[in-house]
Amino acid sequence: MKPIEPKTFVIPELKGMSQKTVEEHLKLYQGYVKNANLIMELGSEFSKDSAKYGYVSAELHRKFSFEYNGIKNHEYYFEQLEGGSTPLATTGALATKIVEMCGTWENFIEHFKTVCTTTRGIGWAVLYYDRDRKNLMTAWIDEQHLGHFNSAQFIFGIDMWEHSYVADYQPSGKKQYVEDYLANVNWSIVEKRFADAQK
């Protein structure tokens, strides 16, 4: 398979989130790319002798979804911060769908904060668009890869692993991290992602 090329992100100064935390977080993203590429390389080699390396090959395949989704989730996460904080267009397609889902924008934000903060453990809070049912849905994803909705498109998400916020907020500051992340989002990028998902 063709190696995965890491993306670069131009992230401005953020409210509450230090540049040091962002830099360290980007290093983790680079690690997911490196590991995914290594798994593809080794998997190809081990599959040549499945009698000898069948177990190792199978475990590499299991691990690949973790590394690959770690790449994609983080690409969405960092893209959402590029270009500076931009509000959601109140008359746009995404805002209309959110109001259809939750009644008001404010209701949606409170709902999404709850998804972020009420689940214990590491993972992601994600807003999806279900192309089949044409609905928005929210979900908690364990780690990087357990619980993704098949056929649904990732529209917006927040990394809730402690490495995302603990240096700036401490473990007890999870709620403030979510507040600040939401304040830093460039919603025009999320709107474009929603538009693309509807094509």
Image: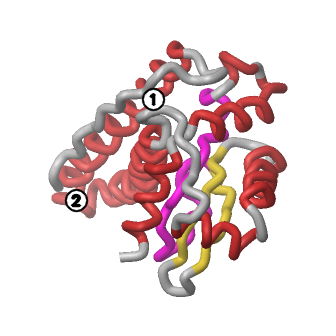
Q: In this view, does 154 lie to the left or right of 195?
A: right
Nearer to us in this view, 23 or 163: 23
Whether 181 is among the magenta residues is: no
Is residue 63 visible to the viewer in this orientation of the structure?
Answer: no
Is residue 32 visible to the viewer in this orientation of the structure?
Answer: yes
Nearer to us in this view, 104 or 10: 104
Residue 113 position (above or below residue 195): above
Check disc 1 and report the residue beneath it: 28
The magenta stretch is: 143-164
Q: Which amino acid does label 2 sit on?
A: Ser
Quadrant of residue 7 in the image? Answer: top left
Residue 88 position (above or below residue 34): below
The image shows residue 60 at horizontal and vertical percentages of: 38, 51
The image shows residue 46 at horizontal and vertical percentages of: 23, 52
Nearer to us in this view, 179 or 166: 179
Q: Residue furthest front?
A: 91
Q: What residue type is labelled 1?
A: Leu
Name the element at disc 1. Answer: helix
The image shows residue 108 at horizontal and vertical percentages of: 74, 59
Q: Is residue 44 left or right of residue 12?
A: left
Callout 1 crowding tier (Cα within 10 Å): few <14, some 14–19, many ≥20: some
Check disc 2 and report the residue beneath it: 47
- Quadrant (top left/top right/bottom left/bottom right) for the C terminus: bottom left
Q: Which residue lies furthest to the bottom in this view?
A: 133
Residue at the image position 67 percent from the left and 64 percent from the top: 138
Whether 160 is among the magenta residues is: yes
- Quadrant (top left/top right/bottom left/bottom right) for the N terminus: bottom left
Residue at the image position 50 percent from the left and 72 percent from the top: 152
The image shows residue 77 at horizontal and vertical percentages of: 50, 42
Cα gap from disc 2 to disc 1, whole angstroms: 28 Å
